[in-house]
Image (cartoon, rainbow, N blue to C red):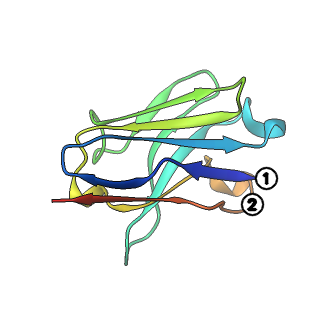
Amino acid sequence: VQLQASGGGLVQAGGSLRLSCAASKMIFSTKTWGWYRQAPGKERESVASISSDGITNYSDSVKGRFTISRDNTKSSVYLQMNSLKPDDTAVYYCNTIPWKITGGWGQGTQVTVSS
């Protein structure tokens, strides 16, 4: 399964970014998808998820600031990140939930938030 995340960059605290991820059509529409992140020296964590029928969940650390969405016609999932904080600095990845459905990880996108 091909997973391609994009949209990261360098932004000042309080700024916004929108991440995009394109996935293989053959598995996209029926799965729950999520955004994960991994900061230096820390384990990868899930920060947001969206089910096949659009139900969303967020970790406490991003709730109220991040919004996950999906477009089944484009086999894509998005993450709108607002009010970014330095603690949001990480490499962001998209994958199914659980991630083992795809069997691996694609290339992530770096998000760096300066104070």
In front here: 55 or 110?
110
Q: Which mark is residue 28?
A: none
The answer to whether residue 102 is left or right of residue 86 is right
In front here: 29 or 12?
12
User: Residue 23 location, x and y as percent?
Assistant: 71, 43
Q: Which mark is residue 1?
A: 1
> Is 25 drawn above or below residue 3 in the view shown?
above
> Is 27 drawn above or below residue 7 in the view shown?
above
The image quarter containing residue 71 is top right
Question: Pointer 1: residues within 10 angstroms few (<14), some, or many (20+)?
Answer: some
User: Who's the residue at 55% across and 41% down the image?
Assistant: 20
Q: Which quadrant, please, contains the C terminus?
A: bottom left
> Is 23 drawn above or below residue 36 in the view shown?
above
Q: Amino acid at mark 1?
A: Val
Seen as rendered, the residue at the extreme bottom is 41
The answer to whether residue 9 is left or right of residue 51 is left
The image quarter containing residue 88 is bottom left
- Closer mark to the observer between disc 1 and disc 2: 1
User: Who's the residue at 51% across and 25% down the image?
Assistant: 55
User: Residue 85 location, x and y as percent?
Assistant: 22, 52
Q: Amino acid at mark 2?
A: Gly
* Contact (Cβ within 8 Å) of mark 1 with mark 2: yes
